[in-house]
Image (tube, rainbow, N blue to C red):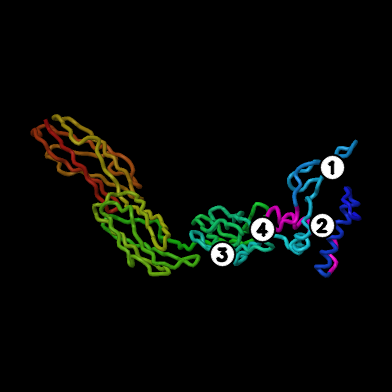
Amino acid sequence: MNGSLIVVSGTSAASPALAGLMALVVQGAGARQGNANPAFYSLADKQRSFGGAAVYHDITSGNNSVPGVTGYTAAAGYDLATGLGSVDAYVLVNHWTDGSTVPTFQLSPAANAVSLTAGGSANLNSAVTVSGGFNSAVSLSVSGLPTGVTATFTPASFAAPGSGTSVLKFTATTSAKAGSYPITLSAASSVTKNTAAVTLTVLPAPTYSLTASPSSMSLAAGKSATVNLTTVPANSFNAAVALTVTGLPTGMTASLTPTSFAAPGSGTSKLTLSAASSVAPGTYSLVVTANGGGVKQTAPLTVNVPGFTLSGSITSASVSANGKVSVTLTTHALGGFNSEVALSVSGLPSGISASFSPQSVAAPGNGSSTLTLTRASGVPVGTSTLTVSGTGGGITKTVTLNLTAK
C-alpha cells in the first residue's frame, strides 16, 4: 500500500477484495447477479465432484483462533475456518456462469406404461441424458415389481459421463397375477438419484377350458357310449389343441372324432368308449387331456362298468353217504350294479341234491348264500365238477366246485 507491503486481516480486508472480484463478474455478465451464494457453492460442488474449473484453493491446515478465543480448524473441503478456501480471481470471473448450471442427469423411459402377458415378456427402452457438466457412472434399478414378475436392465449401468440407453426386459411367470402395478425406475450416481414412474400391466395368460359332458357315465360290458369333449379359448388364446384319453382299463377302447382342433383351439369332439364283454366290472377314473399353445388342460371322466363278483368259500369238498356239505357263496356289486342275483347249480350227479339259503341275493347284489349239498345212500363213489351260477341285471357269473363222493 502506497509502495509498501503491509499485513491486514479480517473482513475489512476480505470484503472489499471479494467485492472487487464481483465487480468484474458483474462487468463480464453485463447484469446484476443478486445473491451470489448459490453460484459460489455450485462452483465448489462442480470442482469437487465433477471435475469443474479450479475456482477455489482448499486450505486444509491452520485455524482462526485468537488470544482468548478458540476458533475453528481448517480441514479438507468446506470448513468453518476457511469456508470454501481462497479464490483464483481469474478462474472465478471467467467461469462464473458455470455456477448457474447444476451437473445432473435425467432418466427418461420410452413410455410411462408397459404391458405383458402372464408367461410372456416385454421390453421398455430407458435413456439417461447428462447436463451441466455431469460426469459420473450411473447405475439402473427397478422396484415395486409384483410377485411372479422379474425385470433386468441391459446394460445395468453406464460409465462416466453417465449417459446411454438401456433395455429393461420384464418377464412374467404363468402364475403372475393379472392387474396394473405402479413401479419405479431408478438411475443413481454417487451423488444424486433420478426416478421415473411406470405403470406395469400384467394380462391374463392365454388359455382355454376343457369340459367333458357327461363327466360320469355307466357303460355295460359289451356296449358303447359317447361323451362330448368341448374346448373354449380365453384371453386371446390362438393355437391348435390335441386331445388324448388315458386310464382305460383292459378291454375298453376309446376313439375321438376329431382328435384335435385347429387354431384358435375351439370345438367339440365326440369320444366313443367301447367295453368288451371281458371288461371287469368296477369304477374307472379316466383322464381326458388337451394340449396346445403351451397350455395343458385335463378333465376327469368316471366310467362305471356295472357287474358283480361271485366267489365260494371253498373250491372242493367231499361228502359221505347220507352226509352233507355246505359252501358259502358271496356276491359283491361293482360299478353301480343294482339288481337281485339269483343262484343256481348245475352238474349235480345222480343222488346228490342242492339247496340255497337264501335262493337269491337281494338288490343291489351284495350278500351271501349257503349252498348245501346232500348225498343219498347208494350214490356211487366218484368226483364231479359242479358249476354254481349267479344271474342278475343281464349278467351271469360262475364258480366251479369239485365234489367228491366217498
Tell me the distance, in whole angstroms, between the alpha carbons under discs 4 and 2.
25 Å
Residue of label 2: 37
Write the residue at 34% across / 57% down: 245
Residue of label 4: 194
Chain part drawn in magenta: 31-56
Q: Position of residue 383 (x, y in %)?
A: 11, 36
Answer whether labels 4 and 2 touch (C-beta < 8 Å). Answer: no
Q: Amino acid at mark 1?
A: Asn
Element assignment for label 3: strand
Q: Amino acid at mark 4?
A: Asn
Tell me the distance, in whole angstroms, between the alpha carbons under discs 1 and 3.
55 Å
Nearest to N terminus: mark 1 or mark 4: 1
**In the image, is residue 241 above or below residue 83?**
below
Tell me the distance, in whole angstroms, between the alpha carbons under discs 1 and 2.
22 Å
Element assignment for label 2: helix
Camera-near label (1 vs 4) is: 1
Residue of label 3: 125
> Label 4: few (<14), some or many (≥20) within 10 Å?
some
> Label 3: few (<14), some or many (≥20) within 10 Å?
some
Q: Amino acid at mark 3?
A: Asn
Write the residue at 27% across / 46% down: 342
In the image: residue 43, left or right of residue 222:
right
Camera-near label (3 vs 2) is: 2
Q: Foreground: 204 or 380?
A: 204
Q: Foreground: 392 or 352?
A: 392
Q: Foreground: 321 or 66?
A: 66
Nearest to N terminus: mark 4 or mark 3: 3
> Label 2: few (<14), some or many (≥20) within 10 Å?
few
In the image: residue 175, left or right of residue 281:
right
Residue of label 1: 64
